[in-house]
Image (cartoon, rainbow, N blue to C red):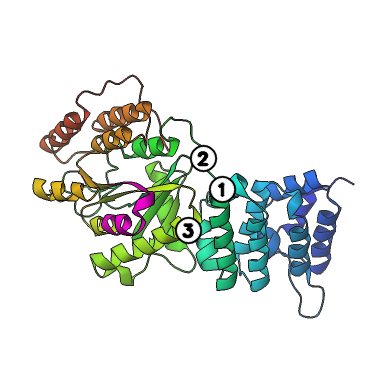
């Protein structure tokens, strides 16, 4: 008989007793493959697992739920499989959950596995792919099995795109060292540049949401700081992204910050080997060292390292870094020109960066006219010779 999805939602609302748990299980058992797929696409999977218990003296309903859904993995499309992984990730994840999550990864191959990883990574809270594989899965053997499968399957996938790894403070938002802008300013053109990178060199993306922020800001067990960071980025206009956080100890020195960021990026490299990588940072907090380490350790898959100068770096230092593959820019128009020259963004993307950089000048609450005109001069210098054929749009 047809499954009553509204009944499942009703049964899961509030406290669920044993009878209601059994009723949910029976409804899921009876569901046809298309119906089960639809239900698991739309249901709050974390609530489903949270509301179904293994009782000390009674039925093992949570175990039954996990086994039932694992047995029917082959009937599910990618989105409900990703939701199922989230359901087991969001609460306490035990060894049996870890094995079930591994089964979800192992059920997908080639480009389908890439789409599954991107779907898991698209959550708007701290429960993303990196958190799942490197934190929630505690058994090293299970993690190794997942990573080995990812590496094997990625070998035959050509995405033609890069995952964008980006710092936050003084890279996206004026926060610490930069005196050219009022504190809290979102840098002109950065949102358009991130959007253009997500769209790729032909403005026809293989996948979207390829943006990850790598920050030295500490994480925490409950994901509260990471969720706060995500909320701040969404308020800034960046809706689709993931976040790799640091530790309190990594805040002590710039070298420790760089080391933490590299460790996080290495996690990301293992999770998405079918994508190339690029890094955007700033000159204020160890990101130059991050760029050096990236090129040293993973240079074969790094497209470009761009450093947003916020401290007034001397020309000779910029030239030296350029010989190492680290490109220092004053504006995101300058960054966009570099990336367009390398085929990383389309011409239309470059034009959007210029247009939005210019438009932003009139919306910033400048400390003085001199401050505004100094930035305008930098933007116009970097935009010289670029014709604008597209109107500015809301990005990312």
Frontmost of labels 2 and 3 is: 3
Report, in whole angstroms, how far the alpha carbon at label 2 lies from the one at label 1.
Answer: 9 Å
Which numbered disc, 2 or 1, marks the residue closer to the eye? 1
Query: Magenta includes 299?
Result: yes
Please report contact status of discs 2 and 1: CB closer than 8 Å, yes or no.
Answer: yes
Q: Position of residue 241 (x, y in %)?
A: 45, 48
Of residues 173 and 313, the one drawn nearer to the viewer in this rendering: 313
Vertical position of residue 205 compared to residue 227: above or below = above
Mark 2 / mark 1, whichever is N-terminal: 1
**Residue occupying the point 16% across, 41% down:** 367
Q: Mark 2 points at which residue?
A: 207
Could you say which disc has been placed on residue 114 in the image? Answer: 1
Expressed as whole percent of the image width and height from the top left, the position of residue 334 reads 23, 36
Range shown magenta: 291-305
Residue contact between numbered discs 2 and 3, judged by CB atoms under 8 Å: no
Left or right: residue 105 compared with residue 184: right
The residue indicated by pointer 3 is 270
User: In the visual, does 346 lie left or right of 179?
Assistant: right
Residues packed near mark 2 inside 10 Å, few (<14), some (14 to 19) or many (20 plus): some
Q: Distance between the residues labelled 2 and 3?
A: 18 Å
Ranked by sequence position, the earlier of labels 3 and 1 is: 1
What residue is rendered at 40% in x and 33% in y?
201
- Judging from the image, what secondary structure is the residue with disc 1 in? helix
Are the residues flagged by discs 3 and 1 in contact, CB closer than 8 Å?
A: no
Of mark 2 and mark 3, the one earlier in the sequence is: 2
């Amino acid at each position: 008989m047809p499954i009553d999805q509204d009944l499942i939602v009703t049964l899961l609302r509030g406290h669920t007793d044993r009878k209601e748990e059994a009723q949910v299980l029976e409804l899921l058992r009876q569901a046809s493959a298309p119906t089960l797929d639809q239900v698991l696409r739309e249901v709050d999977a974390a609530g489903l697992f949270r509301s179904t218990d293994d009782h000390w003296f009674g039925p093992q309903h949570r175990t039954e739920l996990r086994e039932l859904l694992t047995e029917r993995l082959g009937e599910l499309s990618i989105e409900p499989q990703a939701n199922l992984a989230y359901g087991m990730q969001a609460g306490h994840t035990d060894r049996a959950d870890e094995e079930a999550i591994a089964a979800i990864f192992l059920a997908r191959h080639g480009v389908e596995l890439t789409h599954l990883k991107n779907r898991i990574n698209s959550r708007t809270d701290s429960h993303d792919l990196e958190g799942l594989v490197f934190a929630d899965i505690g058994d090293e053997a299970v993690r190794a099995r997942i990573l080995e499968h990812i590496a094997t399957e990625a070998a035959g996938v050509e995405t033609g795109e890069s995952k964008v790894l980006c710092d936050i403070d003084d890279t996206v938002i004026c926060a610490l060292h930069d005196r050219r802008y009022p504190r809290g300013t979102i840098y002109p053109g950065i949102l358009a540049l991130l959007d253009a990178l997500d769209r790729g060199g032909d403005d026809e993306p293989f996948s979207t949401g390829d943006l990850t922020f790598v920050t030295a800001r500490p994480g925490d067990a409950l994901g509260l700081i990471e969720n706060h960071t995500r909320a701040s980025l969404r308020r800034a206009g960046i809706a689709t992204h993931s976040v790799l956080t640091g530790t309190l100890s990594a805040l002590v020195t710039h070298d420790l910050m760089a080391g933490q960021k590299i460790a996080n990026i290495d996690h990301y490299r293992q999770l998405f080997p079918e994508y190339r990588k690029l890094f955007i940072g700033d000159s204020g907090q160890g990101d130059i060292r991050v760029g050096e380490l990236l090129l040293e350790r993973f240079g074969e898959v790094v497209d470009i390292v761009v450093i947003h100068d916020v401290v007034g770096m001397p020309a000779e230092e910029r030239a030296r870094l350029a010989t190492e593959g680290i490109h220092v820019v004053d504006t995101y128009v300058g960054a966009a020109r570099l990336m367009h020259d390398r085929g990383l963004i389309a011409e239309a993307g470059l034009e959007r960066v210029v247009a939005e950089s210019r438009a932003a000048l009139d919306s910033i609450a400048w400390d003085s006219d001199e401050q505004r005109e100094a930035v305008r001069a930098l933007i116009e210098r970097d935009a010289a010779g670029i014709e604008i054929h597209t109107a500015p749009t809301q990005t990312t």
